[in-house]
Amino acid sequence: MRQDGLTSSTALHTLHDLQQDCGELDYVFLSPIYNSISKKGYSAAFRIEDLPPALARARYPVIALGGVTAARVRELRDLGFAGAAVIGSVWEAADPLAAFQELQKTSIVKCRSFS
């Protein structure tokens, strides 16, 4: 049972999972879209051309995760993702603040606080 005011999500790792009923969720993460930046050896799991039809049939808004950089945001939006989550492109950057600010300039990546 959901509690008012809480956001609920889960991580998925196959395109088939996007069509499954996972209960009352606000969105789902799909990963890895590209080769992970923060998890070495964690390679892209999907062919880019398979994503648009799968995203169009998804039961929930889908957030891209895995290898996301500011340079890839437009492609993610064009593919049909509802948003993007980042880890490595900020943490691994020579200037994490500049990397974060570059991502903020895109319309698909928004800063969200969970505290």
Image: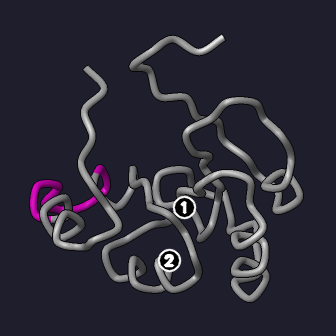
Q: Is residue 81 magenta?
A: no
Residue 45 versus residue 19 in the image, above or below: below
Residue tagged 2 = 76
Q: Residue drawn 19% across and 63% down?
A: 104
Q: Residue drawn 74% across and 60% down?
A: 58
Disc 2 crowd, CA 10 A, few/some/many (<14, 14-19, 20+): many
Q: Nearer the viewer, residue 3 or 29?
A: 3
Residue tagged 1 = 64
Kindly indicate the quadrant of the structure image that contains residue 96.
bottom left
Q: Is residue 94 magenta?
A: yes
Which quadrant is the N terminus positioned in?
top right
Q: Residue drawn 82% across and 62% down?
A: 15
Kindly indicate the quadrant of the structure image that contains residue 30.
bottom right
Residues drawn in magenta: 91-98
Kindly indicate whether the residue at mark 2 contacts the one at mark 1 (C-beta within 8 angstroms): yes
SS for tag 2?
A: helix
Kindly indicate the quadrant of the structure image that contains residue 108.
bottom left
Q: Nearer the viewer, residue 91 or 83?
A: 83
Q: Position of residue 22 (x, y in %)?
A: 78, 35
Disc 1 marks a residue whose amino acid type is Ala
Q: Position of residue 44 (x, y in %)?
A: 68, 69
Q: CA distance from mark 1 to mark 2?
A: 7 Å
Disc 2 marks a residue whose amino acid type is Leu
